[in-house]
Amino acid sequence: MIKVSVVIPTHNSGVYINSAIQSVMSQVGDFEIIVVDDASTDNTEEIVKSFRGAPIQYYRLESRHGGPSKPRNIGIRSARGKYIAFLDSDDLMLPQRLALSSRYLDETPGIGLVFSDGLKFDDVTGVDLGSFLYNYSIFWNLPKISMGDGRQMISAIDAFGALFYTNYIMPSGVTVRKNIIINSGYFDESLTNGDDRDMWFRISRSNSIGYLTDPLFRYRVRSGSISTRGPILAENRIKVFRKQLKFRLDSNLEHQALRMISLNLAGVGYFYRSKGEMEKACSLFRQAIRECFSWFALRGYILSLLHIKPRRQ
């Protein structure tokens, strides 16, 4: 019986996918690997299919979606495991990743998902860049209940509230109950990024979550990845927080959601200001100020209104 289905969304990651799959193959337990290819044009398919005899399913989208949400959903719908573990195609699982997370879920029915910290490393040099969560003070200050053996539990209300300030849960560290993610409505395919945070919002709204204190994945830091594309990231964050405003929130979380929308609108405004598109920048800064006043947005609006361009570094 398959216990864990490992879902790997990928796009043109032929240079990385072999290592990602090998890191899963080294895990202990009953698992399957589901690679969902977002219309790659490189040798990704060839590499995946070279793992003959391995418990791997391969699916390919004929037209590109542009983000991991749709590939993740295809993987979930194809999964035969009780639990779903996610791995980005340029990241690596560390030993015991699947065994520790699935055991925690087995023994603690009150939690919806389990996640861990990861170790960052530079794509070019391979140099260790430290803990992914090192600077996430919001996460470290969260109340946690010790469950022993390197396990901690975070209540639904605390886990949910912290997500309004930062996304401290990386997909490559997550193992989740399949029925929980199905009942939560799958990933939002209108989002090309930020779909993970949107899902964690939905799960933690009614489920406590588990944290494993040992880092259980390696996170590759590279230029050009989707998480480095500022305007795209900001626009998707705005969508995620607008969705939260459709629900009844306490006043602090409602204010924080509006503040995040405002800051991200202003961030996109600064992007267009840097391109010399002052009219578009002014419009975004005005929207930001209407959502939630900030000096950050006001300063950008005034500079754009006066057509003062950023200094070149």
Image: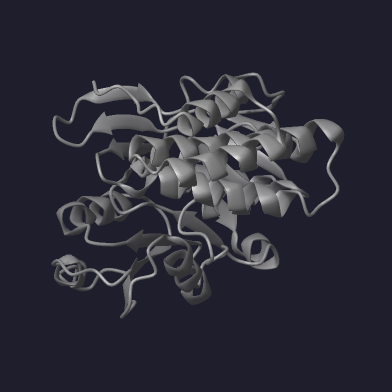
Q: Could you tell me residue 189's position as x and y percent? A: 52, 67
Q: Is residue 16 left or right of residue 285?
A: left
Q: Quadrant of residue 156?
A: top right
For the view shown, which residue lies furthest in the front direction? 306
Pick whichever, 313 or 197, lies toward us.
Answer: 313
Residue 41: tell me if it is visible. yes
Q: Could you tell me residue 254's position as x and y percent? A: 78, 38
Q: Is residue 8 above or below residue 207?
A: below
Q: Could you tell me residue 311's position as x and y percent? A: 30, 22
Q: Is residue 283 left or right of residue 95?
A: right
Residue located 46% across and 20% down the image? 134
Q: Quadrant of residue 60?
A: bottom left
Pick whichever, 279 or 161, lies toward us.
Answer: 279
Q: Is residue 187 above or below residue 93?
A: below
Count of numbered labels shown in the rendering? 0
Q: Is residue 166 left or right of residue 40?
A: right
Q: Is residue 254 left or right of residue 174?
A: right
Give the color scheme: rainbow, by chain, secondary structure or one colour.
Answer: one colour
Residue located 57% across and 37% down the image? 285
The C terminus lies in which quarter of the figure? top left
Q: Could you tell me residue 20's position as x and y percent? A: 27, 52
Residue 149: tell me if it is visible. no
Residue located 19% across and 66% down the image? 44
